[in-house]
Amino acid sequence: MKIAVFDTYVRRPDGRRMHFDILVRDQDTDKDPGLVLAHGRRYLAAKGVPPEQLTSQECRFCHTEFAPPQVEAEIAETGFAIIELQNCD
């Protein structure tokens, strides 16, 4: 499965900057670019970070690639996957 990777940075309530990637099916971004932001906001809400902080300024398309099996399975189940990179704990 070909996926689109969105590089995302959001300021946490404690001032630290979260860095994570949002991964979606490549063709999903063509149909509804707001879908990526919705997935990111869902992730932030689950982490206790105010989801309204995520706008297109903090979330930018980076590249496409082919998904490894575990990412493909997660996208098939939930519609997206998150790669946590910095300060996501």
Image (spheres, rainbow, N blue to C red):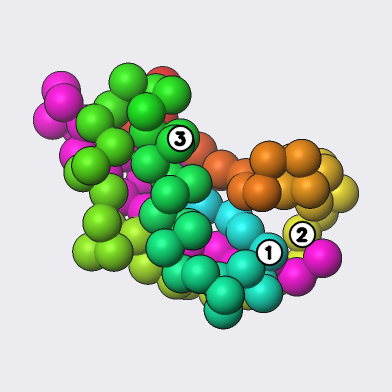
Residue 34 percent coordinates (x, y): 42, 63
**5 left or right of 18 in image:** right
Residue 13 percent coordinates (x, y): 16, 26
Q: Which mark is residue 43?
A: 3
Q: Return the residue found at the far front.
A: 31
Q: Return the residue found at the far right.
A: 69
Residue at horizontal 72%, vertical 48%? 75
Density class for disc 2 (Cα within 10 Å; few <14, some 14-19, many ≥20) is some
> What span is in magenta?
1-21
Q: Which mark is residue 25?
A: 1
**88 left or right of 21 in image:** left
Q: Quadrant of residue 24 in the image?
A: bottom right
Q: Which mark is residue 67?
A: 2
Residue at horizontal 44%, vertical 36%? 42
Q: Could you tell me the amino acid type at mark 2? A: Ala
Gap between marks 2 and 3 measured at Cα: 19 Å
Q: Name the secondary structure under disc 1.
A: strand
Q: Which mark is residue 88?
A: none
Gap between marks 1 and 2 measured at Cα: 9 Å
Pointer 2 or 3: first along the chain: 3
Pointer 1 or 3: first along the chain: 1
